[in-house]
Image (cartoon, rainbow, N blue to C red):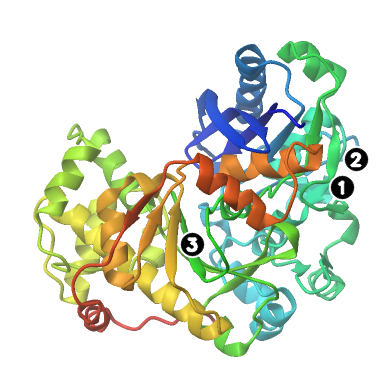
């Protein structure tokens, strides 16, 4: 009989990193937070960077804490946000802190890329939506710098942390698929794109699949963390959304998911990519998932809008309780004010309340006069964007949906979950909030033999062990269809 064993999930987000200790067995799945640390970007010389050494120190502290609280783990898995990378020299030393995807260095770069590879061809090869911060644009932006000239390898953030833990370089495929350099049909780096852009194929480390071994903690790491070896590092869905989709407790295939955090990733799970021109123009992306699946989704700005409002109010001496804000927002009439939640004007940090008010003014919408009205505007605008993405995904992929699963931090936002059910006209199942960490742990546990089976079997274990809440749709979804007409049309894709 297999018994529950200990595993560690390192889950790095845009505002904080966490190390979670989990115990996984055939009929049990528990997780607890061993350590949390701030992920605070730093602007130096006009460029916004990630403080990746501080993140690595937080990971080491977390491994030490997890070992104390849960005992020696069988393995460690790492997931994070996508697209950003560190450049290493010939000795494997980091050539400066990775640049943050919200930095402005790539704003004019897509035109340079599309002059060499047409936007239509780039989509046909990679299936990845247009975004100015995609890895391909970041690499071209960096290509004329001294750092890039000295670079011999580029590692995405979770792969960089894994390299420091193990001394073994590799690129996990779910995150590699977000770079706009990978062919999702072949599962290989695209020589057509690297050649056209003058990128050395040797820059990219060998690919590995979720569940494959990524190395073992080095003697130095074991000494620093107090762990007893050997402790292996297992490749998981290292893009946090890939792990979060593993953590969707769906029954069957007729579901949509919203991985709701700083970003909202809204889509369906498919067996093959959708590479049509209509899909490209709708700005849908085909990112690889665990077990050969495809995450067919659209990026929506997400809770960043609310988070940045709260940061602005804190900075200006007007802090607000999130619980109170949501209570106030629930009393504001639905659909009073709307903005396009995907407007690039909301991408950068700064005075988000002022930018939302300006967008309302420009669109002829009532300008929110109170924080509660502003939060209601955000919630309704996000729900409207979710509705559009769920409907478009079904139409473009020919994939019917009966239920929407909301996982991640947004699953705790009952107002957003209920309004999403209303907007989509479908039931919403909220939870688990720790979907990315749970998906990370499940892939590790399956690789170690603590659980067995397909994604369906892993999701059954989630349904049996994790608290979930169901929201039924209320009112007429046609009201939301008419509300969408209030916003001006904006091209979703270039070219």
Residue pictured at 60% horizontal, 24% vertical: 58
Residue 215 higher or lower than 208, as above or below: above
- Relative image position of residue 175 (x, y in whole percent): 69, 55
Q: Residue at x 21, y 35 (%)?
A: 321
Q: CA distance from mark 1 to mark 3?
A: 38 Å
Mark 1 = which residue?
Answer: 152
Residue hosting label 2: 90
Is label 2 in contact with label 1 (beta carbons under 8 Å)? Answer: yes
Q: Secondary structure at mark 2?
A: loop
| Residue visible at 15% across and 72% down in the picture | 365
Distance in Å between CA atoms under marks 3 and 2: 41 Å
Q: Between 159 and 479, which is closer to the camera in this rendering?
A: 479
Labels 3 and 2: the sequence-earlier one: 2
At numbered mark 3, what does the secondary structure look like: helix, strand or loop? Answer: strand
User: Which image quadrant for residue 340?
Assistant: bottom left
Q: Which mark is on residue 257? A: 3
The crowding category of the residue bearing disc 2, from other C-alpha atoms within 10 Å (few below 14, some 14 to 19, many at least 20), is: few
Q: Quadrant of residue 110?
A: bottom right
Residue pictured at 17% horizontal, 35% vertical: 318
* Res 47 seen here: no
Residue 437 image point, x, y percent: 58, 40
Of mark 1 and mark 3, the one earlier in the sequence is 1
Q: Is residue 237 left or right of residue 40?
A: right
Residue contact between numbered discs 1 and 3, judged by CB atoms under 8 Å: no
- Image quadrant holding the N terminus, namely top right
């Amino acid at each position: 009989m297999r018994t529950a064993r200990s595993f560690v999930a390192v889950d790095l987000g845009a505002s904080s990193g966490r190390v979670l200790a989990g115990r996984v067995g055939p009929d049990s799945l528990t997780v607890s937070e061993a350590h949390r640390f701030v992920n605070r970007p730093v602007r130096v010389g006009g460029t916004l960077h990630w403080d990746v050494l501080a993140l690595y120190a937080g990971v080491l502290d977390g491994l030490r804490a997890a070992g104390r609280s849960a005992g020696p783990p069988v393995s460690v898995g790492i997931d994070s946000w996508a697209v950003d990378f560190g450049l290493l020299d010939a000795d494997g030393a980091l050539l400066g802190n990775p640049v943050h995807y919200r930095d402005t260095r790539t704003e004019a770069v897509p035109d340079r890329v599309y002059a060499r590879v047409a936007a239509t061809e780039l989509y046909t090869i990679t299936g990845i939506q247009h975004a100015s911060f995609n890895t391909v644009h970041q690499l071209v932006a960096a290509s004329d710098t001294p750092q890039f000239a000295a670079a011999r390898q580029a590692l995405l953030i979770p792969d960089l942390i894994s390299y420091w833990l193990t001394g073994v370089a590799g690129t996990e495929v779910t995150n590699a698929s977000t770079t706009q350099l990978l062919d999702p049909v072949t599962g290989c780096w695209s020589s057509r794109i690297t050649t056209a852009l003058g990128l050395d194929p040797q820059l990219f480390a060998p690919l590995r699949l979720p569940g494959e071994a990524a190395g073992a903690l080095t003697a130095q790491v074991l000494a620093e963390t107090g762990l007893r070896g050997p402790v292996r590092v297992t490749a998981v869905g290292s893009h946090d959304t890939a792990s979060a989709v593993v953590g969707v407790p769906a029954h069957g295939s007729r579901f949509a998911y919203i991985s709701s955090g700083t970003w909202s990733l809204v889509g369906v799970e498919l067996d093959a990519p959708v590479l049509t021109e209509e899909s490209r123009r709708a700005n849908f992306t085909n990112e690889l998932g665990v077990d050969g699946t495809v995450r067919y989704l659209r990026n929506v700005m997400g809770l960043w809008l609310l988070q940045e409002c709260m940061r602005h109010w804190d900075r200006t001496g007007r802090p607000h309780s999130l619980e109170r804000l949501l209570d106030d927002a629930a009393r504001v009439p639905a659909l009073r004010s709307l903005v396009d939640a995907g407007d690039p004007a909301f991408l950068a940090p700064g005075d988000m309340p002022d930018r939302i008010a300006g967008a309302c003014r420009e669109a002829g919408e009532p300008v929110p006069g109170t924080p509660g009205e502003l939060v209601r505007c955000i919630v309704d605008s996000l729900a409207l964007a979710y509705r559009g993405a769920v409907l478009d995904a079904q139409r473009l992929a020919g994939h019917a949906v009966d239920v929407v699963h909301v996982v991640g931090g947004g699953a705790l936002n009952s107002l957003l979950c209920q309004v999403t059910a209303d907007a989509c006209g479908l039931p919403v199942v909220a939870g688990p909030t720790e979907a990315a960490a749970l998906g990370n742990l499940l892939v590790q546990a399956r690789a170690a033999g603590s659980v067995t089976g397909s994604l369906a079997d892993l999701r059954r274990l989630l349904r049996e062990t994790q608290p979930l809440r169901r929201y039924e749709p209320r009112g007429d979804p046609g009201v939301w269809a008419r509300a969408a007409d209030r916003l001006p049309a904006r091209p979703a894709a270039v070219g």
